[in-house]
Image: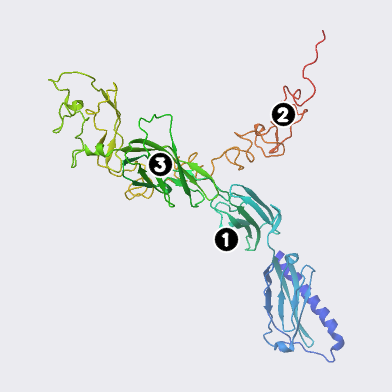
Amino acid sequence: MRGFFKVRARAILLSCIVLLILSALLPVVVSAVVCDDKNTPRFSLPQEFILREDELFEYDINATNIPDASIIYSLSLLNSRITGLKMSTGGVLSLMPGREDSGSSTIAVLAVNGGCVAAKLLELKILSKPVITSYSPFEEAIGINQTATVEFKIKIELDNPKASATIKWYLDSELILGSEDKESLSFTPGYNRSGNYNISVVITASYNLSITKSWLVEVAHINRAPVLTHEVPAFLLVNNTASGAYNLNDYFMDPNKGKLSFSYRQVFPEYEPILSQAEVNVSLLNDGYVTYAPQTGTRGVAYFVFIAKDLFGLSVESNNVKIDVISQFDLGKLPVNGGYEEYCGNLVCGAFENCTNCPYDCGPCVDAIESGCSPIWNCTGWSVCYPQGYQIRVCVDLVNCGDNRTMPSEAKRCRYEATCDDGLKNGIEDGVDCGGPCDVCPNCSDNIRNQGEDGVDCGGPCIPCPSCTDQLKNQNESDVDCGGTCDGCAGGMKCDYNHDCESFKCVKEVCAFASCEDSIKNQGEEGIDCDGPCLRFAATALTE
């Protein structure tokens, strides 16, 4: 029934418009005009067009029974909502809708041929873009460093209360995962980003109209110190023979991927007394490769520390690196082929040993007449098998006879095989003891504290570990570096609980400022609102 009245009202309105036009034309009509199907324009229009803000709308009205050249087209606005609506004499209806045109408007389209008029009503429904009513930051360009965090926020409004909208945030042209349908975005660049970036948010209404807001973010680079990812291993030298050892780039890394330079110094650790100081020269090539060269005739131990420095002067030191130097005489006592266990001191009297040259294994000579000093040898355990194929130890005469003829061997041959725990990048490994047949090389997402990290997957070459001084809102902090497990936040900063605030008072998620009238013991007061920064005393003076 309602539809019937609506159609009836449209018909009455259209009739009135036609009568008004005919009245205007009467003065120029000189003879009676018979308006029939031949001379009355006949055209059709949809009842409604849906237009979109800032999208050009054009529609060509063509009469089906009379050439357009004989017809005068015009339009009549039945309300004043639309601006800029045009009708050409040839019957082309056009409009570039603006935001002020949004909503529904009704117009009458007229076609006049002499004194014969055809008119039709047309409703234009204009959809508008979403509106960003507020946003922050207010600045269009923002400068931050790699570890800083900036909060982007928007508020939107739709003309149609029944419509909905989707929100998507982008870093340059890439969608930021997890940002969909959120009116805020927390952005921390991280160490892998520096330079200029574009943060944008796109709001799209359910009728597929969208609006974009963008910010330019300039990310300043932060230089981080080099990191010792693995301990530099000890090394074995035969005196008078130089030997290449390893590349320090396998043990240090620059988190900023820059080139490192290396240096060294000799150290004399107190925790390990050196019985015999070896004289060793160290050669460092530009690519970080280390070569050791013992001086002629030297024998014993030397310690070195290596330093890695980046292009900006930040540096890190290695562990104390032990260099053992054994003599050709020690090696000369070893069998040439095989015989990995045949040496004086293995507690087995070998074919070439006897009570004279090795009483340590074969026992003292029974018929010998004891006279003078008899050495009592005490030996350390054997070292690991060095890549050169030797193990070494140190033997000391506990009674200091000064007679080394019966001294057990301090070196023995061994079969060196690359392993996944020898502290070297060897075999088909991708790094030191990792990759290839070994475990995957350490990274910042393996849930293991390794490669010089301060914590699990943080610090060192990875992102900084959360702390109360990192200028980031992390851990369980209520604001940047305060609240939660950190110190209380100052007045005006964000909070979740009272203990998040210096004043111990959180009001509507904002820390209140401490005062001497807040009924809380805070700001260094000795009692509630007394002493400390407050002047009055809690206790009433006693009258004597």
Identify the residue at the far bottom of this view.
Answer: 31
Q: Secondary structure at mark 3?
A: loop
For the residues marked 3 and 1, what is the alpha-carbon distance in whole angstroms? 44 Å
Residue 523 disc label: 2
The residue located at (49%, 42%) in the rendering is: 316
Crowding around mark 2 (Cα neighbors within 10 Å: few <14, some 14 to 19, many 20+) is: some
Q: Position of residue 198 (x, y in %)?
A: 61, 58
The residue located at (46%, 47%) in the rendering is: 262
Q: Secondary structure at mark 2?
A: loop
Identify the residue at the far left of this view.
Answer: 367
Circles 2 and 1, Cβ within 8 Å, touching? The answer is: no
> Which of the two residues, 167 or 321, is positioned nearer the viewer here?
321
Identify residue type, mark 1: Ser
Q: Earlier in the sequence, mark 2 or mark 1?
A: 1
Location of mark 3 (residue): 232
Identify residue type, mark 2: Gln
Identify residue type, mark 3: Val
122 to 447, vertically: above or below: below
Q: Position of residue 299 (x, y in %)?
A: 32, 36
For the residues marked 2 and 1, what is the alpha-carbon distance in whole angstroms? 49 Å
Picture quadrant where residue 211 is located: bottom right
Q: Earlier in the sequence, mark 3 or mark 2?
A: 3
The residue located at (21%, 31%) in the rendering is: 344
Q: Earlier in the sequence, mark 3 or mark 1?
A: 1
Q: Is residue 474 left or right of residue 385?
A: right
Crowding around mark 1 (Cα neighbors within 10 Å: few <14, some 14 to 19, many 20+) is: few
Q: What colouring method underlies this structural image?
A: rainbow
Location of mark 1 (residue): 173
Quarter of the C terminus within the rendering: top right
Q: Position of residue 507 (x, y in %)?
A: 71, 36
